[in-house]
Amino acid sequence: MVKQYVVVKHARSDEQRLVLEQINTDGVCPFCPENLSHYHRQPILIEGKHWVVTKNQWPYANTSLQLLVITKRHIEHISELTAQEWVDLGEVVARASLEFKIDSGAMCMRFGEPGLSSASVTHLHAQIIVSDPKALESVKFKIGKG
């Protein structure tokens, strides 16, 4: 069986679903550095030694900003992170909060089995999510089966 790097059923839009299906056909990880620009149309905004920051191509509803913080090394679980990768994560997130003037928000990271974490991409990444103050509903960040 070919390794699956994305989970199509976790797509939140038709466009995202089509891209995830193509990634499955191609059999590559869309977040590994050599593939990122091919599937992800947003530019790299911040680059650390171990992480890159970019806008989410398909942000959640009710957000004013959603950033992806993607590890450069292909890993799928937080237990695989080195001490230096944790330090660099803190540095790039702090830099993003300053550069984007984020006063309030959330940082989330799914890891492990995507059927339980609800990840659409297995490559370890975090999300910085800023809710839209004008939105009538809160941001929904899914985790779990379903």
Image (cartoon, rainbow, N blue to C red):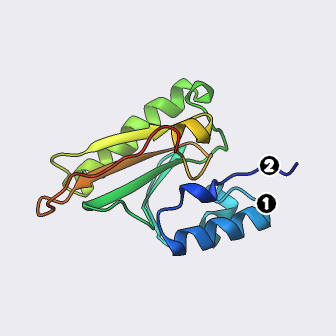
1 vs 4, left or right, is: right
Left or right: 20 in relation to 3: left
Q: Position of residue 78 (x, y in %)?
A: 55, 29
Q: SS of the residue at dot 2?
A: loop
Asked whether the viewer can see residue 33, the reply is yes
Q: Distance between the Cα atoms at labels 1 and 2?
A: 7 Å
Farthest front residue in view: 146
Q: Give the residue number, with chain letter if any, for mark 1.
A: 27
Q: Are marks 1 and 2 in contact (CB under 8 Å)?
A: yes
Q: Residue at x 53, y 75 (%)?
A: 15
From the image, tell me which residue sits under label 2. Answer: 3
Query: Which element type, helix, strand or loop, lies under badge 1?
Result: loop
Q: Is 93 or 41 nearer to us in this picture?
A: 41
Would you call the spot at circle 1 few (<14 residues within 10 Å), some (14-19), or many (20 or more)? Answer: some
Q: Amino acid at mark 1?
A: Gly
Q: Which residue is painted at 38% across and 35% down in the image? A: 90
Please name the residue shown 79% across and 60% down the image.
Answer: 27
Q: Tell me the amino acid under the disc marked 2.
A: Lys
Give residue 45's position: percent from left, percent from top.
41, 62
Answer few, some or many: residues within 10 Å of disc 2's Cα (few below 14, many 20 plus, some between 14 and 19): few
Residue 40 in view of the camera: no
